[in-house]
Amino acid sequence: MKNFKYVRIIHHFILTIRQALSNIIFVIALVLLAIFSQYVIALLRYERPSLPRQFVVYLDPQHVYESINPNTIPANILQTNQRPHALSGHQIRTMIHQAAEDKRVSALWMDLSSFQPSGWAVVEEVYGALAVFKESGKPIYAFSPYYNKPSYFLASIANEIWMDPMGALEINGFASSEIFISDALKNLGIEANILKVGRYKSATESLERNTRSDSNTEMTQSFLSSIWDYYATTASTGRNNQLESSVEIFTPEIRKSLITNPTVRHAKELNIIDRVGNLHEALATTLPNLRFDAFGQVIDSNGIINYLDYTFDLTQQNKQLPLTNMLTSQTKPTVAVIYASGSIVDGYAPWGTIGSASLIGKIQQAVNDQVDAIVLRLDTPGGSSFASEQIYRTLMQVREKNHIPIVVSMGASTASGGYWVSLAADEIVAHPTTLTGSIGVFTYFFTAENFANRWGINEDMIQVPDQYVHSSSLFQKPSELMIASIQASIDHIYDEFLQRVVTAKRASDVSKANEIAQGRVYSGIQAFELGLVDHLGNLQLAIDRAAELSSIGSEFNVIEYSDNATFLDRFKASLFESSYLPILEEKLQRLGLSVNLILSPRPEIYAIETIRIQ
């Protein structure tokens, strides 16, 4: 009886645990169901807007990226017809092209108050489309209370530039700042052991110096001057075409005048803007048919359509907008556009980082889908040399064995490891402001011998079978033999990098490749002049070049491959993804570091560039 009593107690305990677990699982399921239901209800409630016969497209972009983060839009995985919540730079460009040809669209109204592009390539994508829209004879209006360089670049092509009287301008030039922590490391007793190849390879200078080297200063000034000349020339041309004059708006005198007298009305006197007024006044003046309430809010927007609603209307009409990776027609040839943004790392990685296995999976999916050509849109500072090589080999195999032409479209940055990957393409298209080149490699690891001595930390290492064992220690300086071995590995990888430059016919021989390499960065314009890229242009040019190389004609589908995760993976990511990692990554990159580099379990050889433009 006593044993039976214990059995009953154990049985009761098990039932209690099972019931508790069941309740927990049930509660979690209810929470997930409630969240999921919000997406479904939003889809069911949304009604397609009824567009009038004549209307103005209202473009008010905010955060615009190379591609849309799939973790933020799990409802898209259902593949139901719904209004998009945001568009990528290329999708906005395509939408504007459609608006230029659409007889219903009478004008384009840009509210650039919250425009935050992920990089200059996105700005150039949209600018090119605005130029096409303006050539159609339809007017463009631009408004913003604050114009910085990206927003003013877009506004410069408008028929009228409006600005709030309490606004401000910041269009005086480009800057690139770098933080140096060498002294801080020494004060902590930490030493950065750095090995590299390339006189201009500056990614590690923040760890070993207190100021920029002369070569770094020369390179950075040359790069910034190149993109500033392009910016000033392009924006001035846009304004002069509208003003029908040849007014110079970016001379040192005018820029100094803007600093000493930064008022909006002074900017108007200098012909930098056309009209002064708040958003309500700008809308009421340019669109007199709009009706407003006593508080200046639009109460009758019939005649002005938000660009997201307009895009949704176009997709319902089966217009050629590359919004999903679903084939719209099996009868037409297909060009695949594969997006890859972020640092290059080994294995699988989430959106915002280029995992070699993740990107190779997208490439293989495109091959399995029997696409006719592939455009690889790269926006990366580089990363792991090994991961870059894995992607390079895959692309070469697709070209040589599958006979699928590949064109690389460079985004804001395609440097170092990104350029390594690009060398596998048939052709390379870069934006004028693209940061590219940086053909060089490095590695670094930290030791804390002085820190250990200061705090009485001792380490006793045994090496078997002899002293030739390479074992890195946090509290001991690396041996000369270990340093020599790592340097030899770096030299070998640099030689391989140069050989791929020659194989891609970007240089006649290794000696010539070495002259233009040395870790030096170039703007897209400079790279084009050196033969490091084939064309200057946007993503659409890369798509057109891919179609021409595959001889598929002018009628073809465009499919975007931006993520391989399942709906459940994306749904979980949207719930639990940390919003602090991107911020941390951005701060670390200014120090020549990254989360992946710091957490790497071994000294790895990197091909990465850390220059940031402000």
Image: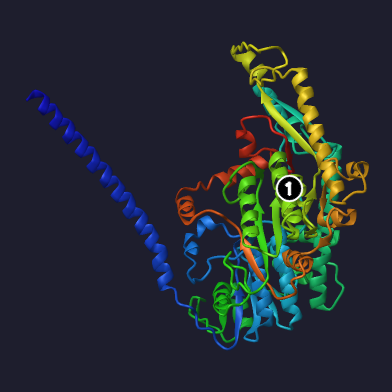
Please state which of residues 165 and 565 is positioned toward the viewer in this rendering. Answer: 565
| Amino acid type at image mark 1 | Tyr
Q: Count residues near mark 1 (Cα–Cα under 10 Å), then give few for <14, some for 14-19, many for 20+.
A: many
Choose top left, top right, bottom left or bottom right for residue 41.
Answer: bottom left
Which residue is at 68% across, 30% downward?
603
Visual colour scheme: rainbow
When the figure is inspected, residue 507 is found, relative to residue 81, above or below; the finding is above
Please state which of residues 380 and 230 is positioned toward the viewer in this rendering. Answer: 380
Choose top left, top right, bottom left or bottom right for residue 230.
Answer: bottom right
- Residue 228: where, in percent of width, then height? 81, 57
Q: Is residue 305 left or right of residue 122?
A: left
Please state which of residues 366 and 96 is positioned toward the viewer in this rendering. Answer: 366
When the figure is inspected, residue 300 is found, relative to residue 534, above or below; the finding is below
- Residue 382: where, in percent of width, then height? 71, 45
On the image, numbered disc 1 is attached to which residue?
Answer: 392
Q: Is residue 105 left or right of residue 149?
A: left
- Residue 372: where, in percent of width, then height? 70, 65
Q: How many marks?
A: 1
Query: Is residue 69 something that shows in the picture?
Result: yes
Q: Is residue 288 left or right of residue 18?
A: right
Which residue is at 70% across, 47% downward?
391
Choose top left, top right, bottom left or bottom right for residue 245.
Answer: bottom right
Query: Is residue 144 something that shows in the picture?
Result: no
Q: Residue furthest front?
A: 401
Q: Residue furthest left?
A: 1
Element on which disc 1 rests: helix
Q: Is residue 485 left or right of residue 598?
A: right
Image quadrant holding the N terminus, namely top left
- Residue 17: where, in percent of width, then height? 24, 38
